[in-house]
Amino acid sequence: MKKAKHVLMVMSGKGGVGKTTVAVNLAAALARSRRVGLLDADLHGPNVPKMLGIEGATMSVQDGSLVPVVTPQNLYVVSVAFGLPEADAPVIWRGPIKMKAIQQFVQEVAWGDLDLLVVDLPPGTGDEPLSVVQVLGDVDAALVVTTPQEVALLDARKAVRFARQVGVKRTAVVENMSVLACPHCGGEIELFGRGGGERMAEHAGVEFLGRLPLKPEIVRAGDEGMPPVLAGGPVGSPFAELADRVWAFITAPVRTPAS
């Protein structure tokens, strides 16, 4: 895909760590001042339209190319969910069909000239992540989302190694659901422990870009189709700050080993 200046894969080693929440809020934050595309490559669990409030939208065809759905936030979105007959229809595809779908979403979509393409991947290191790398051929960065506990970190390490082995230029880690603010006393509750993501990133030799809290408001916003980053305030500010760090990380010159 030659019309995207930068490509960011958002991935995780396992499900349930808030990967799509991070991808949607990053894309929405960066789309306020840039042309950003969001490719929902989680073919079996395409939740991006739900979190953006565009369920039921459909992609049109113009001059032989698919046209992304454009959100009120000026975000260009492609998802298999737009072609399903109903919201709970399962996608029952084997590897070759998934590869073809991703190829179509990249090569047969009128994305336009993008500053950034964010790819929301399914958990793990299987068909979809590998297909995205093979089709795009040049991926600037992978952002691995994890929660602090060891069972999540175990799989996050695999995602980091996957990105390195397939030639992604740089990889970073973000720790999601780091703490829960007690609604009664305001104190921080470390439901899943704390600091595991940063320690894992340091051990793996990749960047650590920060922590995101666990808040009921974030959960409600996702269910209601309004990314909390657009609301601002204490709920949205952690995502906005992460988006700034991610953009700086993606656009920084790639360091090469000294000869």
Image (cartoon, rainbow, N blue to C red):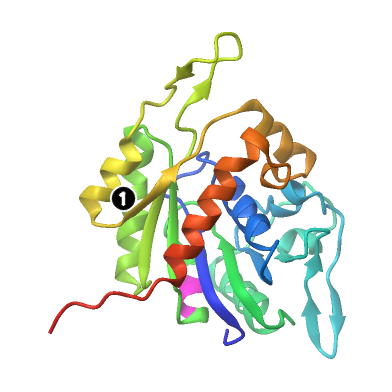
Q: 244 or 167: nearer the eye?
A: 244
Query: Left of 9 or right of it: where is 111?
Result: right
Residue 45 in view of the camera: yes
Nearer to the camera, 241 or 129: 241
Q: Residue 111: name its quadrant.
A: bottom right
Q: Residue at left 29%, top 49%?
A: 201
Please name the residue shown 57% across and 64% down the image. Answer: 119
Q: Is residue 250 above or below residue 239?
A: below
Could you tell me the amino acid type at mark 1? Answer: Arg
Residue 236 is one of the magenta-drawn residues: no
Q: Does residue 13 appear to the left or right of 112 in the view shown?
A: left
How far from the left and from the top, in percent, is residue 41?
Answer: 60, 63
- Comparing 170 with 103, the one in front is 170
Residue depicted at 38% across the width and 57% down the height: 172
Percent x, y for residue 65?
Answer: 78, 85
Q: Residue at x 64, y 84 (%)?
A: 107
Furthest residue in direction left, as rendered: 259
Q: Write the start and end of the magenta stretch as one range.
A: 130-134
Q: Which residue is mark 1?
A: 157
The answer to whether residue 122 shows anywhere in this view is no
Q: Where residue 18 sits in the image (x, y, percent)?
A: 55, 42
Quarter of the rendering occupied by the C terminus: bottom left
- Helix, strand or loop at mark 1: helix
Q: Is residue 75 left or right of residue 160?
A: right
For the N terminus, the quadrant is: bottom right
Q: Residue furthest top?
A: 184
